[in-house]
Image: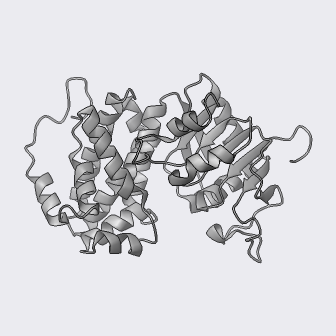
Amino acid sequence: MGRPGMKRIAVIGAGSWGLALALQAARTGAAVHLWARDPTARLANGAMPRLSAHPLPDSINVTDDLTVDADMTLVAVPMQHLAIVLARLDTASPLVLCCKGVRPDSLHFPLDILADVKPGHAGAVLSGPNFAHEIAAGLPAAAVIAAKEDGLARHLADGLGTSTFRLYDSTDVIGVQLGGAAKNVIAIAAGATIGAGLGENARAALVTRGLAEISRLAESLGGKAATMSGLAGMGDLLLTCTGTSSRNFRVGHALGEGMSPHDAEKAAGGVAEGVATSQALTTLAARQQVSVPVMEAVANVVTGRIALKDATEQLLTRPPGPEMKTTGFLN
């Protein structure tokens, strides 16, 4: 793949996010191995269907081969398919998992799944406030790569980053993974707030309280609450709770307008990760004995256990208390 000595980056998955990452990888000067279920699904302009406005350069080789010889491999498949794809993937390169979420059955994050499927394989996670179509267009953006191994995240960030895609490194894999998963749940609540006509003040308050919940849960799991003030926390949360390109926000908005959970998800254009994630995170929070009322409200509404109006009333009638704990973090 590519000239001798040329940097090689593989991207597994040709959805919108995988295609955007492949285009970003090509900007680094790398030869790119892009795995797609149907590599022949090319449009007349050389683009793939999920990002039809962005033709792929010649440095991106689209293939259905999961045997990969690369310096790093970005795995950008949906969370529900991650274990299956990892089991089929044959590579010795470090894996950067680019999906966000929690498996409802095992409560595992992406790196937990990697550890189950490929024990001992070097892995990292990529997260941040990134809409695929903007990354594909080369617009300025930033994200964070987190890995437990000292120096691995920085090495991977240096290999994928450019001046318009700034990559920071972290060793807080728990906080980064939780932030990427939980923001979709809070985005549903934020969308519902706007869809129901409750106003911008209400959305700002709800997002802030949602951030407090994520921080509490991160700390209980061994992560760092400070990570929630960074790109994988507040950054991703801000984008997803305000950007109309967010499917989770659109689902919430439709719920706020009075649609049923089923119709809201259908109107938003497909599966919204926050629906399943809300169930997983409330279960995880209960196990950790952490209070997450906003996440619980979302979980109850999207499953039809409670009406949005009643969930809103429950949140508004909760007794207020000190905003900050003595540690300085949101209470």
Please state, as top left, top right, bottom left or bottom right, where the C terminus lies in the image.
Answer: top left
Colour scheme shown: one colour
Residue 261 is left or right of residue 133, and the answer is: left
Which residue is found at the position 79% from the left and 61% from the top? Answer: 57
Q: Nearer the viewer, residue 290 or 253?
A: 290
Q: Position of residue 166 (x, y in %)?
A: 60, 42
Q: Quadrant of residue 132?
A: bottom right
User: Where is 3 relative to 199, above or below?
Assistant: above
Q: Answer yes or no: is residue 205 visible.
A: no
Residue 64 is left or right of residue 247, and the answer is: right
Residue 295 is left or right of residue 57, and the answer is: left
Which residue is found at the position 35% from the left and 47% from the top? Answer: 280
Q: Nearer the viewer, residue 215 or 200?
A: 215
Report the label total: 0
Q: Position of residue 128 (x, y in %)?
A: 50, 46
Q: Position of residue 117 (x, y in %)?
A: 59, 38
Which residue is found at the position 42% from the left and 33% from the top? Answer: 227
Q: Answer yes or no: is residue 35 visible.
A: yes
Q: Position of residue 88 (x, y in %)?
A: 68, 47
Q: Nearer the viewer, residue 296 or 83?
A: 83
User: Where is 117 relative to 272, above or below?
Assistant: above
Which residue is found at the position 28% from the left and 35% from the top? Answer: 287
Taking the view exactly as shown, the residue that stands out farthest to the bottom is 44
